[in-house]
Amino acid sequence: MNKIFKHSMMLLFSALALVLGSCTEEFEYTGATIEGEQVYFSNALSSTVNLDPNASEVKIPVNRIQRTGELTVNFNVTTSENCAVSVPSSVTFADGDSVAYLTVTYDPQTIQMGHFDDVTVAIADANYTTPYGSSSYTFSIGLSEWTSVGTGLYRDAIYPGFYGAEQLTYNVEIQENILKPGYYRIVTPYGPGTTFYNTYVATGMMAWANKENTSVVINATDPNFVYVTGDFYPGTDDGMASQGYGVMHVFSIVDEAIKQGNSLEDIKASEPGLFGTLKDGMITLPTQSIYVNFDDSFTPLGYLDTTGWAIALPGSEFTDYSSSFTYTGRFTDVAGNNYAEGTITLGEDVANAKYVLAADGDDINAIVEAIADGSIEANGITESGDVSIQIAEGGKYTMVIVTFDAEGNMRSNSATTFTFSTGGGSGTANWQPVTSGTYDQNYFPNFITDEGGQPVGNPFGDGTYSTTLYVDGNDQTHYKLEPWLTQEGSLEFTLDDRGIISFDVIDTGVDSQTGYGNVLVVNANDMFADNPNYPFSFYAEEGIFAFGMMYYVNMNGQQGWMGGATETFTPSQSGAPSMVKMPAAKKGVKSYKAVKGVKKVLNAKVDRSYDSKFFSNRGLTIKK
């Protein structure tokens, strides 16, 4: 059977060779001819037709490939109910013409500004169509409330702020709202034709996501309180959807605050740092302008750092009179005085600046005016640099900075709010290292639950790392762990004669990216003193230190919970428990139980770029 099969195949191949060989020189191919008029709509037609308020008609091109003879083409026209425009149901090609025009007519006096109708025009006779073009055209048509004011300059801060990209400045189209003067729209600032697109998308570094809402709208009706309004998609896809990224979506922080029941005027008074300015034709936006996520929701991952984001309106040029303050932490001198330390950054055109630290509840606008007219004493600075301000009490503070030009004119101001903690224990501690050990920052997720009732855990994630326990030579009940959480961070606490751990509210120094300042930590002992599982921060029978940690932000006097966990420090074998002078609490970490605590109220994601570097530098492991 196999032999028969082989011989049959050989005969078949031989026959094919004879047939193909005999036809090679005489064979000619003639492509199929498309018959008919071949009428079509260009794929380049816009999906939106903006009507001219000073005209009464607009022409839409219709194409054909066959040019011979006069031809009338009928259409099936579908429009929105009560459509404000009149669309003809046919068009006539003149002999020899490849293009004819549908003339859509309208009365601009009767069309509501900003209203658009949906229209579909389809070729009625299939014999007139062609497979090489579209047989129908669907578009929205109306009188736009936006009118172009020309070409301006756009200085990007979104991609430098999130991806670390180079900050680009380039030309963009800018429109103003006819109905609401002072509303500006930056038309697709990252789209085709822009310097950004040519640099990152056209080169294949990022993909284009083909989103429709890609323009930035800015409310500059009050030039002293300018902010982004609405939401938009920059338009790119970074290709990292599997890692929780992909197509970026951003939306207004101020708008979200208004949705929560705050009035715009209240936000201006309480959170002036959320606003930018319009001065001398330049819109300058603040560090905290927009929330960011990677879906279509309005649930923020956190705010996107937009330091340096600016737009120069047509006819204007960029000048940089900006200022910003970055809180870096607390310093305590040998005399026990506490200082808030940070860095002031000034724009390159600033001749000098003055700054004042305002307490919670102070009128920021009045302080700005007082600094400008010299009626309040302020600190002076002529260049960017570090500053240190003595503070007696912990709490919420705002760094107010006013910048001036070379002629002494006030040009800009900024207000940055942060939370300052004086820390636990005495400022004159005599720290002595006792033992090294291992810190577990998410030993037992607890205290804060999500909507499903599951513990959220430490918002900074899982992680173990080496650290050192110190004791105060002047107070044997006073301890600290250093480093803690960050390379510069420390955790001070006291241990009483029952083995119970106490500590003041801790400012982690890490920005929450929620618009509410740094992440804070409170002792679960202080929150659940009456709970049957108390204490939650204690020196355990196993010789382990347990810390009940509840992470939150200060939401205008209320705690916005982010997560919570029991965290542990396990001394090395060569160290204590012998070094601890106080007895252990009659409790072990192995028998820990969940506490019915509070629900997480912030959908915020802590920026972990800082701790990833810290952990990797120290050879630690942390789950992402």
Image (cartoon, rainbow, N blue to C red):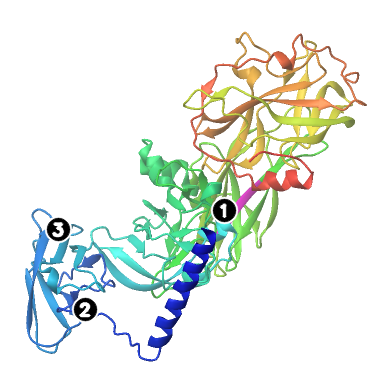
**Prevailing secondary structure class for the magenta stretch in the rendered image:** strand
Q: Residue at label 3? A: 112
Splitting the image into 4 quarters, where does residue 511 fall? top right
Would residue 140 appear left or right of 71 to someone viewing this image?
right
Percent of width and height locating residue 108: 11, 66
User: Element at badge 1?
Assistant: strand
User: Label 3 amino acid?
Assistant: Gln
Residue situated in front as seen by the camera: 397 or 482: 482
Residue lying at 10% horizontally and 60% vertically, measured from the top left: 84
406 w.r.t. 218: above or below: below
Is 129 magenta? The answer is: no
Residue situated in front as seen by the camera: 537 or 183: 537
Residue lying at 15% horizontally and 86% vertically, measured from the top left: 67
10 Å neighbourhood of mark 1: few (<14), some, or many (≥20)? many
Splitting the image into 4 quarters, where does residue 418 fall? top right
- The dot on residue 574 is none
Which badge, 3 or 1, is on the more N-terminal residue?
Answer: 3
Q: Residue at label 2? A: 34
Percent of width and height locating residue 427: 79, 32
10 Å neighbourhood of mark 3: few (<14), some, or many (≥20)? few
- The dot on residue 401 is 1
Percent of width and height locating residue 477: 82, 20
| Mark 3 vs mark 1, CA separation in Å | 45 Å
Q: Are marks 1 and 2 in contact (CB under 8 Å)?
A: no
Q: Is residue 487 visible?
A: yes
